[in-house]
Amino acid sequence: MVVAAEERVSTAPPADGSRTGRLIDSAVDPFKKTVRRYRTTLRMFLDVGIGVVLQQTQMNDRERRFPDR
């Protein structure tokens, strides 16, 4: 699984002593994870659906070409 750069959080404090926007990052991360999860699920369903449609199309073409089989 590919880990995006914004998901990696270093535990060391920044060199200039300021606090980077961790609260903002932690608030956005669950939304990004949810979007990514829905996107991968949708992509999986689309792949399966397209595969079924193509398979049915090929079977129908075979039946049309060779009706006696």
Image (cartoon, helix red, strand yellow):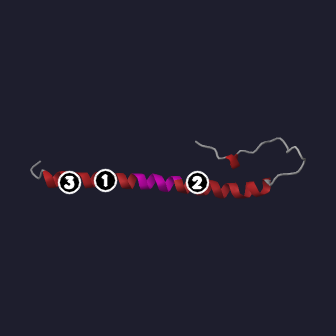
Q: Quadrant of the N terminus?
A: top right
Horizontal and vertical percent position of residue 54? 31, 53
Q: Earlier in the sequence, mark 2 or mark 3?
A: 2
Name the residue type under label 1. Leu
Residue at the image point whose x is 80% and y is 55% from the top: 21
Residue denoted by label 1? 54
Residue most extreme to the front: 16
Q: Few, some or many C-alpha atoms within 10 Å of disc 1 (few <14, some 14-19, many ≥20)?
A: few
Residue most extreme to the left: 68
Q: Secondary structure at mark 2?
A: helix
In the image, taking residue 19 as reference, residue 50 lies left or right, namely left
Q: Few, some or many C-alpha atoms within 10 Å of disc 2 (few <14, some 14-19, many ≥20)?
A: few
Residue at the image point whose x is 59% and y is 57% from the top: 35
Residue at the image point whose x is 70% and y is 49% from the top: 6
Q: Earlier in the sequence, mark 2 or mark 1?
A: 2
Q: Secondary structure at mark 1?
A: helix
Q: Secondary structure at mark 3?
A: helix
Residue denoted by label 2? 36
Name the residue type under label 2. Arg
Residue denoted by label 3? 61
Span of residues in magenta: 40-47
Circles 2, 1 touching at the beta carbon (< 8 Å): no
In the image, taking residue 16 as reference, residue 47 lies left or right, namely left
In the image, taking residue 46 as reference, residue 12 lies left or right, namely right
Q: CA distance from mark 2 to mark 1?
A: 27 Å
Taken as a whole, is the magenta stretch helix, strand or loop?
Answer: helix
**Label ID, residue 43:** none
Name the residue type under label 3. Asp
- Look at the image and say whether residue 18 sits in the magenta stretch: no
